[in-house]
Image (cartoon, coloured by chain):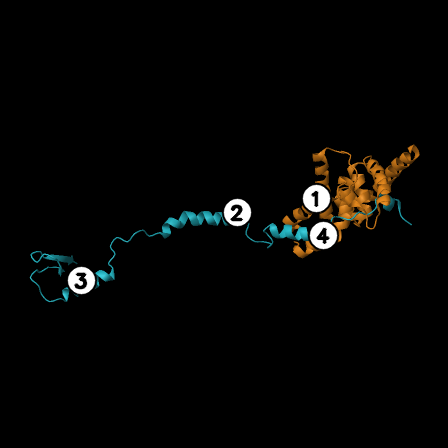
Chain colours: A orange, B cyan
Amino acid sequence: VAIDEADLLAAHRRLEVPLHNVLYRWLWDSQECQDLSQDAFMRVWKDRQRVDPQRIDALIYATALNLAKNRMRWRGLWRFQSPDEEAACDGEGPEAFALRSGSQQRVRSALQQLDASARNLLLLSEFAGLSTVELAEVLKVPEGTIASRKHRAMAVLKGVLERDDVRT
Amino acid sequence: MMSELERWFPKVQPPPGGAARLQMAMTASGDAKPGFWPGYVWAGMAMLAIALSPLAWTGPQRNPQPEEVAVAMDALAAQPARAVRIVGGDAVELAHTDASVRVFLVMTR
């Protein structure tokens, strides 16, 4: 049970974009997300003798999310920042970005209403493509509760966003 | 149709160069060969080598018998008999500007 350089680079090709998107909804800074992602991959690399190649994706997600949690604690929890301009989507013009940026600030505020586990469950469900078993492993929750937890998290997020819509 | 999650979480692209950066970091970590001896093994071996190094130095030789000396003495012994006789060695007369002075280089075994 071990991974080699080719395994890790393949995992990076597979996970770079989805992991970046998950981390972005925590840190809201593209460069910081890449730094943290690199850190997570290197930590897995240093422990490669004990890494099961079949579980590498879940391990990288779990490592990166732990690092993100520590980073958030370190930088002062929930300090508000505007989403950075580097995170513009492909082919997106300034007007579209401005609109999305406003929308993203609302989503960001809404995400803050969720606890870490619920937020990670939504983000991983959307981006990571992990199985229910893997989600349970990354989030350290019983496998049978994944669906209900996701439903509850969606309801909270939707409720907050709709409440904001009514206010505005 | 776009799901709610897709609408709330539009996909963002990471900065370029992530793969190259990771590869460089793996190379720079200096332990690219799995199972290679860790640093503390090398440190231990270096300390052992330093501790044992004085034993490798045998010190100056006390009684060197350079071959050149033996050859010179044999050459002296082969010279014709002179007025001065050396037992257990030999001598050679050196030139001197004063004819009344005789200088000998004496060598004994």
| Dot 4: chain letter | A
The residue under label 3 is: B73
The crowding category of the residue bearing disc 3, from other C-alpha atoms within 10 Å (few below 14, some 14 to 19, many at least 20), is some
The residue under label 1 is: A36
> Against B97, is A78 above or below?
above
Q: Along the polypeptide, which appears first: circle 2 or circle 3?
A: 2
| Dot 3: chain letter | B
| Dot 1: chain letter | A
- Same-chain check, marks 3 and 4: no
| Dot 2: chain letter | B
The quadrant in which the C terminus of chain B is found is bottom left
> Type of residue at label 4?
His
Q: Position of residue A8 (x, y in %)?
A: 68, 53
What is the distance, in whole Å, between disc 3 and disc 4 at their CAs?
A: 82 Å
What is the distance, in whole Å, between disc 2 and disc 1 at their CAs?
A: 29 Å
Quarter of the figure with residue A140: top right
The residue under label 2 is: B40
Residue name at image x 52 percent, y 47 percent: B40
Q: Position of residue A122 (x, y in %)?
A: 82, 43
Residue name at image x 80 percent, y 43 percent: A121
What is the distance, in whole Å, between disc 2 and disc 4 at their CAs?
A: 31 Å
What is the distance, in whole Å, between disc 2 and disc 3 at their CAs?
A: 58 Å
The numbered disc on residue A12 is 4
Quarter of the figure with residue A65: top right
